[in-house]
Image (cartoon, coloured by chain):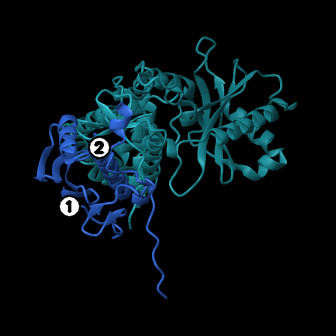
Amino acid sequence: MITLENKATQIDDLLDKMAEEVQLDATRYERMKNSYEAVKNWVEADELFFKPYKYDVYPHGSVRIQTSVRPIGKDEFDLDIVIHLMSQTPHTPQKIYSELNRRLGENEIYRKMMELKNRCIRLNYSGDFHMDILPGVQETEYNQNKIKVPDRELGYWVSSNPRGYSEWFMGKANLVKESLLEKAMRAENLPANRFQDKKPLQRSVQLIKRYRDIYFQKDDTYKASSIILTTLAGQFYQGEESIFETVDNIITTTYSKVNEPYGRLKIVNPVNPAEDFTDKWDSEPGYYEAFKQFASHLFNEWQKLKNLQGLLEEGDIMKGLFGEDIFIKAQTNQTMLIEQLRKENALGVSRNTGILSSLSSVGAAGIKTNTFFGE
Amino acid sequence: MAGKYKSRNKSIAEQVASMRKKYPQFTVSFSSPSSMKVIGMLQPTSRSISYQFILKYNLTDYPKTKIISPTLHKNSKGEEIPHIYTGEKLCLYQPKYFEFNRKDFLCDTIIPWTSLWLYYYEIWHLTGVWLGGGEHPKKLNLF
């Protein structure tokens, strides 16, 4: 139970609960897993081409690193998976792509869901999620993460390392041994399982992506991409223990970098420095301008949150940043837990300030049962 | 016997003494030999502002609590503040359940309840819902 006597844990609890409202739910994750296992089985059973090869099938992207965010107004998630041919094959990635296209097309159900994309084939599980299947061939024997993937626009293959990227990101997320919320739970001898699987960096990426969706809701012409936001968050993260400080550090660093007198902020792929995720910012400067304004807005709002006194002003800022609906749900959840304590006569009040706290806190006095009455 | 002490009515002098002991930062005074006044600050959560309240009590009436500053206000939808009597006195308990009676110390009941009330007041502003439970008096239907 996160009670109300500590400022930092109180706000982190709220941020955590907001991220939870937009994240991928466990039941849908199970459905996704079953769906990609089914695709794997279908491809593996292919007598014409795929059967002799060894594969691995795994998710990459936000599902793998647990930073998924439900898009606004839709209840559909992205699932990126790789069909990774383990050993070197004599075939080009283009050949693999066309064979995957053929094989999926042989299935009545998949045929109706298919959409061909530049590097992948998409299956639309309407109203639930869409699965982007990236076929890849392992580049070398010694690096099990690097794969060659087809690029139909280039007419050639490109090097990709989705699993390496995930490992890089998780390495950053695990820079913190125990988060502020985990510590708070431990201090009260409560199981902290819920926070163990979501580190402050993952939560911060979810919140920044959600803020991006709100910010660009009216005009998404120059919307910042998730890969850019996720990468810069990972790059600037220093192992902060709280979600609040993590966002603060990421946005402060970003803000100072985009306001440097020359050059521009560059975000390169950490596992392939030759790949600049922000190369579009040169060819289409509107993206960079929009990104600068987006970063400045979050920076300024976060400064206000740091300096403000009062739940009401704070609530207004958070509603503006992350959306009124998820703020209200998160705040209601937090209050219902306090209400639970009150019902169990485990809520106390600090004698110095009147701040509500758990009864076990030092200097807290118990609260007798009462029933609010009146109009 | 301690139980006996607990179960008898408290005098104003006892109320004043216990309030001063538990909340030494409050201004506690006698208004007359049978009535008292408390002025103090309460902050319901560490992220909340502090509210100044006044509590008046005499042995022949219910304790009356009011927030002096900042001024309490309607929510953004223009809805009236829940659980408040005319004159902006806070409705902290249901009189018919004797949740407060003259055997209770104000410092163990009215003060924590005021903090709770302020918490739910703030949450009501944030969520539009009074999450602290409670009862409303039955309205008489005259038609």
Who's the residue at 41% across and 29% down the image?
A181
Q: Quadrant of residue A361?
A: top left
Q: Which residue is mark 1?
A: B71
Looking at the rendering, in which quadrant would you find the N terminus of chain A?
top left
Q: Do dots 2 and 1 share one subunit?
A: yes
Residue A98 location (% of width, % of height):
73, 39
> The residue tagged with tag 1: helix, strand or loop?
loop
Q: Amino acid at mark 2?
A: Phe
Bin the neighbour count of mark 1 within 10 Å (Cα to Cα): few under 14, some 14-19, many 20 and up.
few
> The residue tagged with tag 2: helix, strand or loop?
loop
- The chain ID associated with circle 1 is B
Residue extending furthest toward the right: A47
Who's the residue at 29% across and 40% down the image?
A355
Q: Amino acid at mark 1?
A: Thr
Bin the neighbour count of mark 2 within 10 Å (Cα to Cα): few under 14, some 14-19, many 20 and up.
many
Residue A194 location (% of width, % of height):
52, 31
Query: In the rendered view, does A139 fall on the left or right side of B4?
Result: right
- Asked if residue B50 can be seen in this view, the reply is no
Front residue of A17/A173: it is A17
Chain A on-screen colour: cyan
Query: In the rendered view, does A8 fall on the left or right side of A212?
Result: left
- Indicate which disc residue B105 carries: 2
Who's the residue at 27% across and 60% down the image?
B61
Chain B on-screen colour: blue
